Amino acid sequence: MAKLNVKPLADRVLVEPAPAENKTAGGIIIPDTAKEKPMRGKIVAVGNGKPDEPMTVKVGDTVLYGKYAGTELNVEGKEYLIMRESDIYAII
């Protein structure tokens, strides 16, 4: 992976969303208009945390987050989400 020129501040993280599913478990192909926004991704950059709250996630962690969490960001033609660590539900 290429080095990103984005460094999140404080308790924010930069997440690369997982690709949306193309097929259902039964094998039905999902069209682009019906695909759900993925709610998991891989952390590619983390901030330094707050003085009283150190960061608990690290680069490379796969995380679950809310459906509407974060702000979409396009960096060098690739889609990312930037969000607060508190928007993350779990590390998987």
Image (cartoon, rainbow, N blue to C red):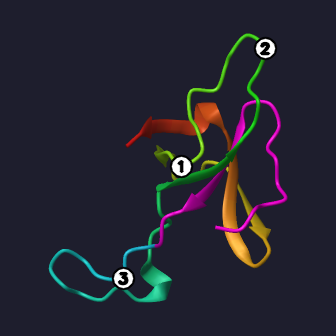
N-term-proximal mark, 3 vs 2: 3
The C terminus: image quadrant? top left
Residue 17 lies in the magenta stretch:
yes
Q: Nearer the viewer, mark 1 or mark 3?
A: 1
Q: In the rendered image of this protein, does residue 4 appear above or below residue 57?
A: below
In the image, the segment drawn in magenta is 1-19
* In front of the other: 59 or 88: 59
Q: Tell me the kind of residue under disc 3.
A: Asn
Q: Which residue is mark 1?
A: 60
Position of residue 18 measured from the top left corner of the image (x, y, whole percent): 48, 65
Q: Which residue is mark 3?
A: 22
User: What separation in Å lies between label 3 and label 2 (alpha carbons)?
Assistant: 42 Å
Q: Disc 1, disc 3: CB below 8 Å? A: no
Of helix, strand and loop, which one carries label 2?
loop
User: What separation in Å lies between label 1 and label 3 (alpha carbons)?
Assistant: 24 Å
Crowd class of label 3 (few under 14; some 14 to 19; many from 20; radius 10 Å): few
Q: In the rendered image of this protein, does residue 44 appear above or below residue 74?
A: above
The secondary structure that most of the magenta stretch takes on is loop
Residue at point 47%, 36% (across, down): 89
Q: Which residue is mark 2?
A: 51
Q: Tell me the kind of residue under disc 2.
A: Pro
Crowd class of label 2 (few under 14; some 14 to 19; many from 20; radius 10 Å): few
Q: Nearer the viewer, mark 3 or mark 2?
A: 2
N-term-proximal mark, 1 vs 2: 2
Query: Which numbered tag is attached to residue 35?
Result: none
User: What separation in Å lies between label 1 and label 2 (alpha carbons)?
Assistant: 23 Å
Residue at point 84%, 59% (across, down): 5
